[in-house]
Image (cartoon, helix red, strand yellow):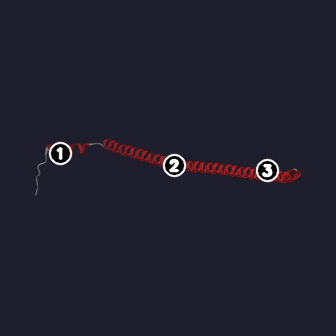
Amino acid sequence: MDIQVKVPNFVMRTAITFATRTEEENNLKTSKCQFRQIQLRKTQLRKARFREAQLRKAQLRKTQLSKAKLREAQLKKTQLRKTLLRKTQLGEAQLKKTQLRKTQLRKTQLGEVQLKKTQLRKTQLGKTQLRPVFDIVLLFR
């Protein structure tokens, strides 16, 4: 039983060309395929390396940013400490000044009071010393 199948001409031609190819042509074809595969692998590797490099760069940027932010935060903290120190030192200095002023005021007020007291004593002493003389003068008149 022979079954006849009608095959189009172009299929027959390609079948014939494949059958008639020599060994060298087949080897060339395989070497071309291998070359393409090697090239594909190389490009894939290149792309993978590029992606890895990009990732590393991005991570570096992130770490540098975070380090910079940390530095800024530490700077702010130190500046705050310094300003607080300055403020406290200024406050202490002002406190000392005001205390000095107050003590000087007290001293001057105490001195004035003592002066007044001594002046009063002197005047009272003078009056008491003068009285008897005055009294004596009055007695003689």
Give the residue number, with chain letter if any, for mark 2.
69
Q: In front: 45, or 113?
A: 113
Of 70 and 79, nearer the camera is 79
**Residue type pointed to by label 1:** Val
Mark 1 or mark 3, whichever is nearer to me: 3
Mark 2 or mark 3: whose residue is earlier in sequence: 2
In the rendering, which numbered label is found on residue 119? 3
Of the numbered discs 1 and 2, the one sitting upstream in the chain is: 1
Q: In the rendered structure, find residue 11 and report the number of the disc placed on it.
A: 1
- Of 128 and 65, nearer the camera is 128
Residue 68 horizontal/vertical position (percent) = 53, 47
- The kind of residue on which mark 3 rests is Gln
What is the secondary structure assignment of the residue under circle 1?
helix
Q: Gap between marks 2 and 3, in whole Å?
A: 73 Å
| Earlier-in-chain disc, 1 versus 3 | 1
In this view, the residue in front, 41 or 103, is: 103
2 or 3: mark nearer the eye: 3
Provide the secondary structure element on which disc 2 rests: helix
Seen at 55% across and 48% down, the residue is 76
Left or right for 99, reference 66: right
Marks 1 and 3 close (CB-CB < 8 Å): no
Name the spot of residue 96 as percent of width and height, x first: 69, 51
**Residue placed at 78% from the left, 50% from the top?**
115
Q: Is residue 8 left or right of residue 81?
A: left
Give coordinates of residue 43: x percent, y percent.
Answer: 39, 44
